[in-house]
Amino acid sequence: MATQSLVMLAVAAAVGSSGASGAAPTWRRPVLVELYTSQGCSSCPAADAFVRELPALGFGRDKVVPLTFHVDYWDRLGWKDPFASAAFTGRQEWYAGSGKLRSPDGAAGLEGLYTPQMIVDGTVHFSGRSRQVALREMERAAAQPPRFDLAIQAAIRGSAIHLTVLLADAGAARPDRHEWRVTAALAAKKARTSVGRGENAGETLDEAEVVRALSERSPVPPAGGAVNLRLSKPADLSWSEADLVVFVQSEATREIGAVRVLDARRLAVE
């Protein structure tokens, strides 16, 4: 109980630090938070726990939309992560090779591929264990207006989700649609794994929003057009335990232009 109280105090201090008046920050849009992690990494459970605790800390899906990507380069070091994917490692490499991510620590910040890596709004990265840094960067991102308004039509057909995404420009600024892409992810709301080997041998790991399927990055069409995507559900994931996350991202800057999350159990079944 004492630990939980300390965490809540830390969160309150971090969020209330914007402005001398201590007023609550303006949350203008949901913020996408990506965590790159592995069950074979002993530093990762603390970051996974932070993602899992976000709603209890006051950061529900109307404010923060997390996605946990399990990378596969730890698999050869003693424990094969059942959620790891080369595609997720590829997405982390896509960020690392872009030269677009900034570190809150400047030149002294972390570089390259590492776990746990947290990326907020597609633009800033740091250790996923740095809770106060994470909260500060989430608040900074949330203060910016979205680039797009998303309208999503989605339906379940057998073991797949079929979705149509309509994008309207948000606000006065008109983004250059040529540089933006739409991506969809299917994530397990929660997962529990008993680890038998590696750095976390003997531990039972509880994780949240574990990405199980990821679409290609599809170009945003001209105004009035739509993006059609399809995601297949893994056999061991039930629809009742899945979230569908759709986001728009700049190929040029990696910035997230908008993000929405839908509870798969509320989708129409055809």
Image (cartoon, rainbow, N blue to C red):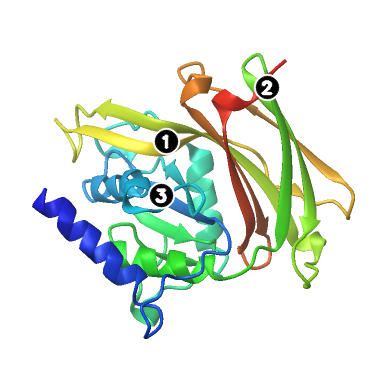
Disc 3 and disc 1 in contact, CB within 8 angstroms: no
Q: Percent position (x, y) of residue 207?
A: 33, 37
Q: Is residue 8 left or right of residue 95?
A: left
Which residue is identified by label 3? 36
Q: Residues within 10 Å of mark 2 (few under 14, many from 20)?
A: few
Image quadrant where one finds the C terminus: top right
The residue depicted at 43 percent of the width and 37 percent of the height is 210
Above or below, 241 against 222 in this view is: above
Above or below, 241 against 96 in this view is: above
Frontmost residue, 14 versus 213 = 14
Q: SS at mark 2?
A: strand
| Amino acid found under the numbered disc labelled 2 | Ala
Q: Percent position (x, y) of residue 21?
A: 38, 83
| Amino acid found under the numbered disc labelled 3 | Tyr
Which residue is identified by label 2? 268
Q: Is residue 50 left or right of residue 7?
A: right
Disc 1 and disc 2 in contact, CB within 8 angstroms: no
Q: Is residue 91 left or right of residue 200?
A: right
* For marks 3 and 1 on the same chain, the one whose residue lies earlier in the sequence: 3
* For marks 3 and 2 on the same chain, the one whose residue lies earlier in the sequence: 3
User: In the rendered picture of this protein, how many numbered marks are placed on residues?
Assistant: 3
C-alpha distance separating marks 1 and 2: 29 Å
* For marks 1 and 2 on the same chain, the one whose residue lies earlier in the sequence: 1
Q: Is residue 101 visible?
A: no
Which residue is identified by label 1? 84
| Amino acid found under the numbered disc labelled 1 | Ala
